[in-house]
Image: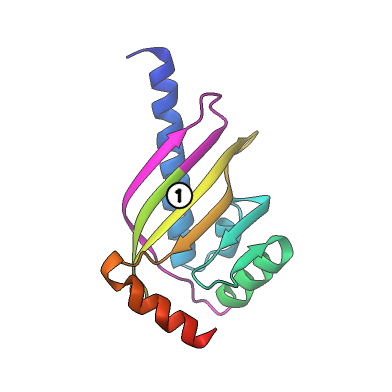
Amino acid sequence: MSAHHSRHDLRQAAVHVVLDDFHEAASVADEERYLGHFAPDAVFLGTDPGDRWTGVDFRSFVHSVFSGGEGWTYIPSSRSVSIAADGQTAWFDEMLQNDSYGECRGTGVLRFRGDGWRIEQYSLSIPIPDELAPEIVTRIREIR
């Protein structure tokens, strides 16, 4: 294995560790640990069309939920991580299980900052099978 591949593999492994800890922190409502995985200007896109959280608004939302001792649990079942050629940016997609939402998909981007990998953007969605899409689209149009 070349030195380039081993650095690449180590970076991928480090991103996996960050994402695993990010989900673990959320599941135990560890606000400081959870928010520590985000870059200061990060964007979190939730499942609802209006869920675009940034900065203080996102931190306030997390605090309002976690301060009651309840978090949210998304258990990764698979994940792909890619690292840019410069070794400073990573992007990923992962499948997750959640008791309320069932199978979900998380996608995002991390950037290596001086003290480690930070999430720049995280997007959580509920994948809809193509055969259900027409029905779901109709239902969405009915409520909008």
User: Residue at point 44% right, 45% down?
Assistant: 92
* Residue, far right: 56
Q: Is 23 drawn above or below residue 119 in the view shown?
A: below
Q: Residues within 10 Å of mark 1 (few under 14, many from 20)?
A: many
User: Residue at point 62% right, 77% down?
Assistant: 64
- Can you give x and y, in whole percent of width and height, for residue 9 in the image? 39, 28
- Can you give x and y, in whole percent of width and height, for residue 32 in the image? 61, 60
Q: Nearer the viewer, residue 87 or 117?
A: 87
Q: Is 66 drawn above or below residue 94 in the view shown?
A: below
User: Residue at point 29% right, 73% down?
Assistant: 132
Q: Is 139 drawn above or below residue 133 in the view shown?
A: below
- Can you give x and y, in whole percent of width and height, for residue 60 in the image? 68, 71
Is residue 85 at all visible to an observer of this figure?
yes
Q: For the C terminus, give its image quadrant.
A: bottom right
Label 1, on which residue? 19
Which range is magenta? Answer: 68-91
User: Residue at point 46% right, 80% down?
Assistant: 140
Magenta span contains residue 86: yes
Magenta span contains residue 12: no
Is residue 100 at all visible to an observer of this figure?
no
